[in-house]
Amino acid sequence: MEKPNIDYIKELAGGDKDFEKKLIAIMIDEFPTEKEKYYNSLELEDDKFIIEIVHKLKHKISILGLKKSYEIAVEYENNLRAGNSDLEKEFKETLSVMTQFLASL
């Protein structure tokens, strides 16, 4: 599995350490809530909301430099729209990797 990083965040911040810290803080703050919403929507079998939250989470996946995982998230979202939950396991693995990484920041 690929490893997350903050390279894109650093690039966006353009050397502004305060802005970089703010972007990281937003990720740390928003990700757990969105992840929880994802798991709750799975439990409730709320397909529309699952798609919506996967869409939001895929952008965070991209921000953390997880290119292959982003591609999986895009395909997973498309599969969900077609009524297919293939790639759920892989998506959950990505969320786990992100959780560990963000906890280390």
Image (tube, helix red, strand yellow):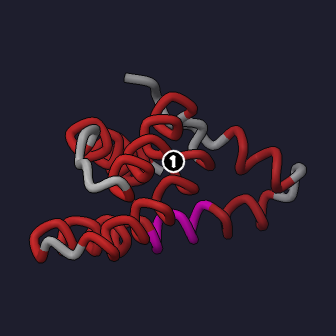
**Type of secondary structure dominating the magenta stretch:** helix
Taking the spot 33% from the left edge, 49% from the top edge, the residue there is 95
Nearer the observer, 10 or 2: 2
Packing grade of label 1 (10 A; few <14, some 14-19, many >=20) is: many
Disc 1 marks a residue whose amino acid type is Ile
Left or right, residue 40 beside residue 71? left
Left or right, residue 66 beside residue 101? right
The correct choice, above or below, for 62 with respect to 50 in the image is above
Left or right, residue 66 beside residue 6? left
Taking the spot 72% from the left edge, 43% from the top edge, the residue there is 8
Residue 60: quadrant of the picture:
bottom right
The correct choice, above or below, for 10 with respect to 41 in the image is above
Residue at the far top: name it: 1
The quarter of the image holding the N terminus is top left
Q: Is 27 inside the magenta-drawn segment?
A: yes
Counting from the top left corner in percent of width and height, residue 50 is at: 31, 67
Residue 43: quadrant of the picture:
bottom left
* Range of magenta residues: 24-30
Left or right, residue 49 beside residue 86? right
Counting from the top left corner in percent of width and height, residue 53 is at: 40, 68
Q: Which residue is mark 1?
A: 61
Q: Secondary structure at mark 1?
A: helix
Q: Is 68 inside the magenta-drawn segment?
A: no
Number of callouts:
1
Counting from the top left corner in percent of width and height, residue 77 is at: 42, 53
